[in-house]
């Protein structure tokens, strides 16, 4: 979840797939589109009210698009975080399909996650669309660290 009341919704093309997953980890609504058609990407962004994040130079200056200036994930996160003043509280989206996660009773995860994970965690979230469970494991520290770097302008 993002602390802003109305965080932007993003559309990410094939040039920034890794970024899309990290933004989803951070709870942002991010659709992925692998279309090679610039016109289709812009039309979809406009139609769905999304900001297109891309490395494609031919989209520089397009009202719906943000040209990512780096190939490096940390720099991309920083660019997007700074431009949109994003602050992340918790993961609320599936990193695979972008559906909203639902908090479920712990017992639902029994037999569906590794035994060690089940024994060592009390809270689980579930994606109804792709049948995946999520928990705040070691990846969550990485997400929090990346979120902090999003607003770090001293680098």
Image (cartoon, rainbow, N blue to C red):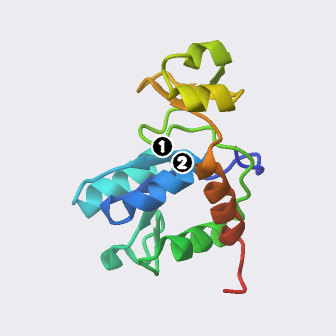
Q: Taking 20 as reference, is 130 above or below it? A: above
> In the figure, is residue 10 to the left or right of 36?
right
Q: Are marks 1 and 2 in contact (CB under 8 Å)?
A: yes
| Residue 95 marker | 1
Q: Earlier in the sequence, mark 1 or mark 2?
A: 2
Look at the image and tell me in which quarter the N terminus lies.
top right
Examine the image and state in which quarter residue 105 appears.
top right
Residue ID at (41%, 27%): 130
Look at the image and tell me in which quarter the C terminus lies.
bottom right
The percent coordinates of residue 135 (x first, y second) are: 61, 35
Residue ID at (63%, 64%): 146
Residue ID at (22%, 59%): 37
Q: Taking 147 as reference, is 122 above or below it? A: above
- Furthest-bottom residue in this view: 154
What is the crowding at mark 1: few (fewer than 14 residues within 10 Å), some, or many (at least 20)?
A: many
> In the figure, is residue 144 to the left or right of 112?
right
Is residue 26 visible to us here?
Answer: no
Distance from the alpha carbon under mark 1 to that under mark 2: 5 Å
> In the figure, is residue 8 to the left or right of 63?
right
Q: Which residue is mark 2?
A: 24
Residue ID at (67%, 55%): 141
Examine the image and state in which quarter residue 96 appears.
top left
The percent coordinates of residue 24 (x first, y second) are: 54, 48
Is residue 87 visible to us here?
Answer: yes
What is the crowding at mark 2: few (fewer than 14 residues within 10 Å), some, or many (at least 20)?
A: many
């Amino acid at each position: 979840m993002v602390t802003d009341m109305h965080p932007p919704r993003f559309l990410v093309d094939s040039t920034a797939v890794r970024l899309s997953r990290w933004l989803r980890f951070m709870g942002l609504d991010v659709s992925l589109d692998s279309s090679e058609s610039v016109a289709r990407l812009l039309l979809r962004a406009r139609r769905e009210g999304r900001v297109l994040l891309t490395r494609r130079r031919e989209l520089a200056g397009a009202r719906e698009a943000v040209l990512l200036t780096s190939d490096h994930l940390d720099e991309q996160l920083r660019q997007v975080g700074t431009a949109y003043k994003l602050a992340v509280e918790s993961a609320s989206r599936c990193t695979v399909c972008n559906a909203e996660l639902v908090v479920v009773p712990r017992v639902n995860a029994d037999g569906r996650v590794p035994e060690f994970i089940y024994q060592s965690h009390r809270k689980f979230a579930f994606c109804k669309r792709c049948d995946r469970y999520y928990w705040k494991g070691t990846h969550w520290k990485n997400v929090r660290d990346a979120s902090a770097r999003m607003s770090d302008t001293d680098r």
